[in-house]
Protein backbone atom coordinates (compact mmCIF):
# COMPACT_ATOMS: atom_id res chain seq x y z
CA UNK A 1 0.00 0.00 0.00
CA UNK A 2 1.32 3.45 -0.91
CA UNK A 3 2.28 5.83 1.88
CA UNK A 4 -0.18 8.65 2.58
CA UNK A 5 0.46 11.92 0.79
CA UNK A 6 1.43 14.70 3.17
CA UNK A 7 0.17 17.95 1.67
CA UNK A 8 0.43 21.53 2.91
CA UNK A 9 -2.53 23.64 1.79
CA UNK A 10 -1.95 27.39 1.83
CA UNK A 11 -5.40 28.91 1.42
CA UNK A 12 -7.09 31.83 3.20
CA UNK A 13 -10.63 30.69 2.31
CA UNK A 14 -11.55 28.59 5.34
CA UNK A 15 -14.71 27.11 3.82
CA UNK A 16 -12.88 25.98 0.68
CA UNK A 17 -10.08 24.55 2.81
CA UNK A 18 -12.52 22.64 5.02
CA UNK A 19 -14.26 21.06 2.04
CA UNK A 20 -10.93 20.08 0.51
CA UNK A 21 -9.73 18.60 3.81
CA UNK A 22 -12.87 16.47 4.04
CA UNK A 23 -12.42 15.16 0.51
CA UNK A 24 -8.69 14.49 0.80
CA UNK A 25 -9.16 12.65 4.10
CA UNK A 26 -11.08 9.96 2.17
CA UNK A 27 -8.23 9.64 -0.36
CA UNK A 28 -5.35 8.90 2.02
CA UNK A 29 -4.08 12.47 1.97
CA UNK A 30 -2.94 14.09 5.22
CA UNK A 31 -3.77 17.74 4.56
CA UNK A 32 -2.35 20.44 6.83
CA UNK A 33 -4.01 23.81 6.33
CA UNK A 34 -2.49 27.25 6.93
CA UNK A 35 -4.00 30.58 5.92
CA UNK A 36 -0.99 32.70 4.97
CA UNK A 37 2.46 32.53 3.44
CA UNK A 38 4.42 33.21 6.61
CA UNK A 39 2.73 30.28 8.35
CA UNK A 40 3.41 28.06 5.34
CA UNK A 41 7.13 28.86 5.36
CA UNK A 42 7.28 28.25 9.11
CA UNK A 43 5.58 24.86 8.72
CA UNK A 44 7.96 23.84 5.94
CA UNK A 45 10.90 24.71 8.17
CA UNK A 46 9.50 22.50 10.93
CA UNK A 47 8.32 19.40 9.08
CA UNK A 48 8.45 17.67 5.73
CA UNK A 49 5.67 17.59 3.15
CA UNK A 50 5.29 15.73 -0.13
CA UNK A 51 3.59 18.60 -1.93
CA UNK A 52 2.45 22.18 -1.35
CA UNK A 53 -0.91 23.41 -2.64
CA UNK A 54 -0.40 27.14 -2.88
CA UNK A 55 -3.06 29.77 -3.51
CA UNK A 56 -1.92 32.91 -5.31
CA UNK A 57 -4.08 35.45 -3.46
CA UNK A 58 -2.96 35.38 0.16
CA UNK A 59 -2.85 37.97 2.94
CA UNK A 60 0.60 39.40 3.62
CA UNK A 61 3.09 37.51 1.46
CA UNK A 62 1.41 36.57 -1.81
CA UNK A 63 1.65 33.12 -3.36
CA UNK A 64 4.29 34.16 -5.89
CA UNK A 65 6.71 35.31 -3.21
CA UNK A 66 5.97 32.20 -1.15
CA UNK A 67 6.76 30.04 -4.18
CA UNK A 68 10.01 31.92 -4.77
CA UNK A 69 11.08 31.41 -1.14
CA UNK A 70 10.12 27.73 -1.20
CA UNK A 71 12.19 27.19 -4.33
CA UNK A 72 15.17 28.92 -2.73
CA UNK A 73 15.39 26.42 0.12
CA UNK A 74 13.14 23.39 -0.48
CA UNK A 75 12.75 20.70 -3.15
CA UNK A 76 9.09 20.05 -2.35
CA UNK A 77 6.80 20.14 -5.41
CA UNK A 78 4.44 23.12 -5.63
CA UNK A 79 1.01 23.09 -7.26
CA UNK A 80 -0.35 26.62 -7.56
CA UNK A 81 -4.05 27.41 -7.35
CA UNK A 82 -4.87 30.29 -9.68
CA UNK A 83 -7.88 32.36 -10.65
CA UNK A 84 -9.66 30.93 -13.69
CA UNK A 85 -8.56 32.54 -16.92
CA UNK A 86 -5.83 34.64 -15.31
CA UNK A 87 -2.92 33.90 -17.62
CA UNK A 88 -0.63 36.30 -15.78
CA UNK A 89 -0.94 34.26 -12.58
CA UNK A 90 -0.17 31.02 -14.37
CA UNK A 91 2.83 32.44 -16.21
CA UNK A 92 4.28 33.95 -13.05
CA UNK A 93 3.84 30.72 -11.09
CA UNK A 94 5.42 28.55 -13.77
CA UNK A 95 8.34 30.94 -14.19
CA UNK A 96 8.97 30.85 -10.45
CA UNK A 97 9.30 27.07 -10.57
CA UNK A 98 5.82 25.77 -9.75
CA UNK A 99 5.42 22.16 -10.89
CA UNK A 100 1.84 22.59 -12.01
CA UNK A 101 -1.17 24.86 -11.66
CA UNK A 102 -4.88 24.27 -11.21
CA UNK A 103 -7.36 27.03 -12.08
CA UNK A 104 -10.10 27.96 -9.60
CA UNK A 105 -12.77 26.84 -9.12
CA UNK A 106 -11.50 23.29 -9.42
CA UNK A 107 -12.81 19.79 -8.94
CA UNK A 108 -11.04 18.18 -5.94
CA UNK A 109 -10.70 15.00 -7.97
CA UNK A 110 -8.72 16.87 -10.63
CA UNK A 111 -6.51 18.47 -8.00
CA UNK A 112 -5.79 15.04 -6.50
CA UNK A 113 -4.91 13.70 -9.96
CA UNK A 114 -2.52 16.59 -10.53
CA UNK A 115 -0.91 16.04 -7.13
CA UNK A 116 -0.37 12.36 -7.85
CA UNK A 117 1.04 13.11 -11.29
CA UNK A 118 3.57 15.52 -9.78
CA UNK A 119 4.49 13.05 -7.06
CA UNK A 120 5.12 10.27 -9.55
CA UNK A 121 8.02 12.42 -10.73
CA UNK A 122 9.59 12.70 -7.29
CA UNK A 123 8.35 9.72 -5.29
CA UNK A 124 8.23 6.56 -7.42
CA UNK A 125 6.38 3.71 -5.74
CA UNK A 126 9.48 1.51 -5.89
CA UNK A 127 13.09 1.89 -7.01
CA UNK A 128 13.56 1.11 -10.69
CA UNK A 129 16.68 -0.06 -12.42
CA UNK A 130 17.64 1.37 -15.75
CA UNK A 131 15.29 0.07 -18.43
CA UNK A 132 16.65 -2.62 -20.75
CA UNK A 133 17.83 -1.64 -24.20
CA UNK A 134 15.02 -1.56 -26.71
CA UNK A 135 12.36 -0.73 -24.11
CA UNK A 136 9.71 1.31 -25.97
CA UNK A 137 9.15 3.49 -22.91
CA UNK A 138 12.74 4.77 -23.10
CA UNK A 139 13.67 7.62 -25.41
CA UNK A 140 17.41 7.89 -26.04
CA UNK A 141 18.83 10.93 -27.82
CA UNK A 142 22.62 10.88 -27.68
CA UNK A 143 23.64 10.89 -24.00
CA UNK A 144 20.12 11.85 -22.88
CA UNK A 145 17.91 8.95 -21.80
CA UNK A 146 14.27 9.49 -20.85
CA UNK A 147 12.61 6.60 -19.05
CA UNK A 148 8.92 7.45 -19.37
CA UNK A 149 7.77 4.52 -17.22
CA UNK A 150 10.05 5.41 -14.32
CA UNK A 151 9.71 9.16 -14.93
CA UNK A 152 13.49 9.47 -14.83
CA UNK A 153 15.92 11.40 -17.03
CA UNK A 154 19.61 10.56 -17.24
CA UNK A 155 22.46 12.31 -18.99
CA UNK A 156 25.55 10.21 -19.50
CA UNK A 157 24.13 7.71 -17.00
CA UNK A 158 23.65 10.33 -14.28
CA UNK A 159 20.11 11.06 -13.14
CA UNK A 160 18.92 14.63 -13.74
CA UNK A 161 16.24 16.19 -11.53
CA UNK A 162 13.50 17.90 -13.55
CA UNK A 163 10.21 19.52 -12.65
CA UNK A 164 7.03 18.03 -14.12
CA UNK A 165 6.82 20.75 -16.78
CA UNK A 166 10.47 20.32 -17.75
CA UNK A 167 9.97 16.57 -18.03
CA UNK A 168 6.90 16.95 -20.24
CA UNK A 169 8.64 19.45 -22.51
CA UNK A 170 11.63 17.15 -22.90
CA UNK A 171 9.42 14.14 -23.69
CA UNK A 172 7.46 16.13 -26.28
CA UNK A 173 10.70 17.19 -27.96
CA UNK A 174 12.29 13.73 -27.73
CA UNK A 175 9.31 12.02 -29.35
CA UNK A 176 9.96 14.15 -32.40
CA UNK A 177 13.73 14.43 -32.13
CA UNK A 178 15.24 16.06 -35.20
CA UNK A 179 11.95 17.81 -36.03
CA UNK A 180 10.86 21.31 -35.11
CA UNK A 181 8.06 21.31 -32.53
CA UNK A 182 6.06 24.53 -32.62
CA UNK A 183 5.42 26.54 -29.48
CA UNK A 184 1.70 25.86 -29.77
CA UNK A 185 2.29 22.12 -30.06
CA UNK A 186 4.56 22.15 -27.02
CA UNK A 187 2.12 24.22 -24.97
CA UNK A 188 -0.71 21.81 -25.78
CA UNK A 189 1.46 18.76 -25.07
CA UNK A 190 2.61 19.86 -21.63
CA UNK A 191 -0.56 21.51 -20.30
CA UNK A 192 -1.96 18.26 -18.91
CA UNK A 193 -0.23 15.17 -17.47
CA UNK A 194 0.69 12.62 -20.13
CA UNK A 195 -2.02 10.26 -18.87
CA UNK A 196 -4.65 12.58 -20.32
CA UNK A 197 -3.36 11.84 -23.79
CA UNK A 198 -3.34 14.05 -26.83
CA UNK A 199 -5.82 16.74 -27.62
CA UNK A 200 -5.31 18.92 -24.55
CA UNK A 201 -6.47 22.45 -25.41
CA UNK A 202 -3.87 25.05 -26.28
CA UNK A 203 -3.02 27.30 -23.34
CA UNK A 204 -1.30 30.60 -24.22
CA UNK A 205 -0.14 31.07 -20.63
CA UNK A 206 1.95 27.89 -20.90
CA UNK A 207 3.26 29.08 -24.28
CA UNK A 208 4.54 32.30 -22.73
CA UNK A 209 6.41 30.42 -19.99
CA UNK A 210 8.08 27.94 -22.36
CA UNK A 211 11.25 29.98 -22.75
CA UNK A 212 11.88 29.90 -19.00
CA UNK A 213 11.43 26.13 -18.79
CA UNK A 214 13.58 25.51 -21.85
CA UNK A 215 16.29 27.72 -20.37
CA UNK A 216 16.22 25.63 -17.18
CA UNK A 217 16.35 22.42 -19.20
CA UNK A 218 19.45 23.70 -20.97
CA UNK A 219 21.06 24.53 -17.64
CA UNK A 220 20.56 20.92 -16.57
CA UNK A 221 21.32 19.09 -19.82
CA UNK A 222 23.79 21.17 -21.83
CA UNK A 223 27.54 21.50 -21.34
CA UNK A 224 27.23 25.14 -22.43
CA UNK A 225 23.64 26.40 -22.04
CA UNK A 226 24.50 29.57 -23.99
CA UNK A 227 25.59 27.47 -26.97
CA UNK A 228 23.24 24.46 -26.78
CA UNK A 229 23.90 21.40 -28.89
CA UNK A 230 20.76 19.49 -27.89
CA UNK A 231 17.79 21.83 -27.42
CA UNK A 232 17.91 24.39 -30.21
CA UNK A 233 15.64 27.36 -30.86
CA UNK A 234 13.97 27.71 -34.23
CA UNK A 235 13.26 31.43 -34.23
CA UNK A 236 9.64 32.39 -34.57
CA UNK A 237 8.51 28.76 -34.63
CA UNK A 238 9.57 26.63 -31.66
CA UNK A 239 12.28 24.21 -30.58
CA UNK A 240 14.02 21.09 -31.80
CA UNK A 241 15.86 18.37 -29.88
CA UNK A 242 18.80 17.73 -32.20
CA UNK A 243 19.90 14.20 -32.90
CA UNK A 244 23.66 13.63 -32.58
CA UNK A 245 25.43 13.72 -35.91
Image: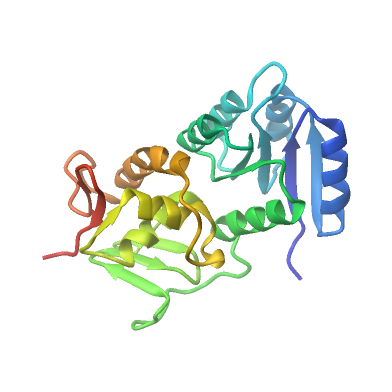
Q: Is residue 90 left or right of residue 103?
A: left
Quadrant position of residue 126: bottom right
Q: Residue furthest top?
A: 60
Residue with the most extreme left position: 245
Point 57% across, 27% down: residue: 64
- In the rendered image, residue 238, in percent from the top left (x then y), is placed at 27, 49
Residue at (47, 74) in percent of width and height: 129
Vertical arrangement, residue 19 with respect to residue 148, above or below: above
Q: Position of residue 34 (x, y in %)?
A: 79, 31
For residue 157, above or below residue 207? below
| 57 shown above or below 75 | above
Quadrant in the picture for the N terminus: bottom right
Quarter of the image with the C terminus is bottom left
156 vs 77, nearest the viewer: 77
Residue 152 is left or right of residue 127, and the answer is left
* Residue 226 x, y percent position in the rendering: 20, 38
Residue at 74% x, 32% y: name it: 43
Q: Is residue 57 above or below residue 170?
A: above
Tell me: 4 left or right of 102.
right
Residue at 74%, 51% (x, y): give it. Answer: 107
Image quadrant assignment for residue 180: bottom left
**234 displayed left or right of 15:** left
Amino acid sequence: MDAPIRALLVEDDRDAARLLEEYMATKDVLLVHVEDGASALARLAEQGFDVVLLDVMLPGIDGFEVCRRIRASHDVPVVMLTARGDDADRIAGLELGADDYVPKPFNPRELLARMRAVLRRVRPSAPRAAAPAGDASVLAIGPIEIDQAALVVRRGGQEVSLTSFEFRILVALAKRAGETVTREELASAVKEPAARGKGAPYDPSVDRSLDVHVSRLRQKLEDDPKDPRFIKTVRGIGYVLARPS
